[in-house]
């Protein structure tokens, strides 16, 4: 895609695939589930034209990156360890970058700011295999990308009948959707799902950080149609002081009207401008 370069980088004992473009201050883009570096394609191109070196890895377990077999290899410490070493490779002089995260990538970005705030200049925060195999990769990917489910009941993963055609949203072409399908057909979903299998373990590992605040300058963006935004207590937490208390570095909250979960693909021009305007303050 238009000059995007791809290479493998050895970090933390594994090989990570990265997509990158141009030289300049580094912006590190972290994808969510079930996504890939490709979810940031619009941002990689646009922000590189604005003078940044844009880098989007496939996280461990995804795409062409290594897929460790052990569930224990997907804790928050393992993945943040990958990111810390990747940052040192990308910027060996300053060893500090701008970070943008979505979904799981946003959670990992918060972990990175919590564990190693010295590595982050500023942060922009965006937000089962057996049954998956039976349903089929094509169906699983398109269900997630068109109607992101919060819960996946056993035996009935998605609310639509499996023989009902899926109409892709206007922001996602069949060719773009098939890129995800092809990648996950090669790798399966075990690696990505291991992130979720470590939720309880991560809670235990994070006990020493209970009560710690995130001081890194941060900007939060979310779509007003994202189901997470409508979870009980979420709006109150975001808008009435709870979020600011936990993240004293929070500078701004942006809720995009009419936008669902995948904001980087749904409203790329708006998201690109928000990212550029925010990071421009820190040169």
Image (tube, rainbow, N blue to C red):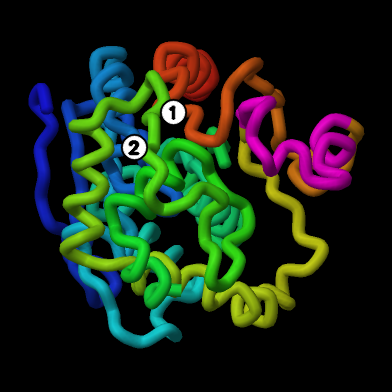
Pointer 1: residues within 10 angstroms few (<14), some, or many (20+)? many
Residue drawn at x 43%, y 46% is 143
Kind of element beneath mark 1 = helix
Q: Secondary structure at mark 2?
A: helix
Q: Which disc number belongs to residue 264?
A: 1
Q: Is residue 94 above or below residue 71?
A: above
Dot label at residue 131? none
Q: Is residue 280 visible from the viewing direction of this image?
A: no
Q: Which residues are magenta?
A: 219-239
Q: Residue at x 57, y 53 (%)?
A: 107
Residue 60 image position (x, y, % from top left): 31, 65
Where's residue 71, x and y in %? 42, 83
Percent of width and height locating residue 189: 34, 67
Residue drawn at x 49%, y 44% as measured from the top left: 120
- The reply to whether the magenta stretch includes residue 206 is no
C-alpha separation, residue under disc 1 versus residue under disc 2: 7 Å
The residue closer to the viewer here, 145 or 71, is 145
Is residue 230 inside the magenta stretch? yes
């Amino acid at each position: 895609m238009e000059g995007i370069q791809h290479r493998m980088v050895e970090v933390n004992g594994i090989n990570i695939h990265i997509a990158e473009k141009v030289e300049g201050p580094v912006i590190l883009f972290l994808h969510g589930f079930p996504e890939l570096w490709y979810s940031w394609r619009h941002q990689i191109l646009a922000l590189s034209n604005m003078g940044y070196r844009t880098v989007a890895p496939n996280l461990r377990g995804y795409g062409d990156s290594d897929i460790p077999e052990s569930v224990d290899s997907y804790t928050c410490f393992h993945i943040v360890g990958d990111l810390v070493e990747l940052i040192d490779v990308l910027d060996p002089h300053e060893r500090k970058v701008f970070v943008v995260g979505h979904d799981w990538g946003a959670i990992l970005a918060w972990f990175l700011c919590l564990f190693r705030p010295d590595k982050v200049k500023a942060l922009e925060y965006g937000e089962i295999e057996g049954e998956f195999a039976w349903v089929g990769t094509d169906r699983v990917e398109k269900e997630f990308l068109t109607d992101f489910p919060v819960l996946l009941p056993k035996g009935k993963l998605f609310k639509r009948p499996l023989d009902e055609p899926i109409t892709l949203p206007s922001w996602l072409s069949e060719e773009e959707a098939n890129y995800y399908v092809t990648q996950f057909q090669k790798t399966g979903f075990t690696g990505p799902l291991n992130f979720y299998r470590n939720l309880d373990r991560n809670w235990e590992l994070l006990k020493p950080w209970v009560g710690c605040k995130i001081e890194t300058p941060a900007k939060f963006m979310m779509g007003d149609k994202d189901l997470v935004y409508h979870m009980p207590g979420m709006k109150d937490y975001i808008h009435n002081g709870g979020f600011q208390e936990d993240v004293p570095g929070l500078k701004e909250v942006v809720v995009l009207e009419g936008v669902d979960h995948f904001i980087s693909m749904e409203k790329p021009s708006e998201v690109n401008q928000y990212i550029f305007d925010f990071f421009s303050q820190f040169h």
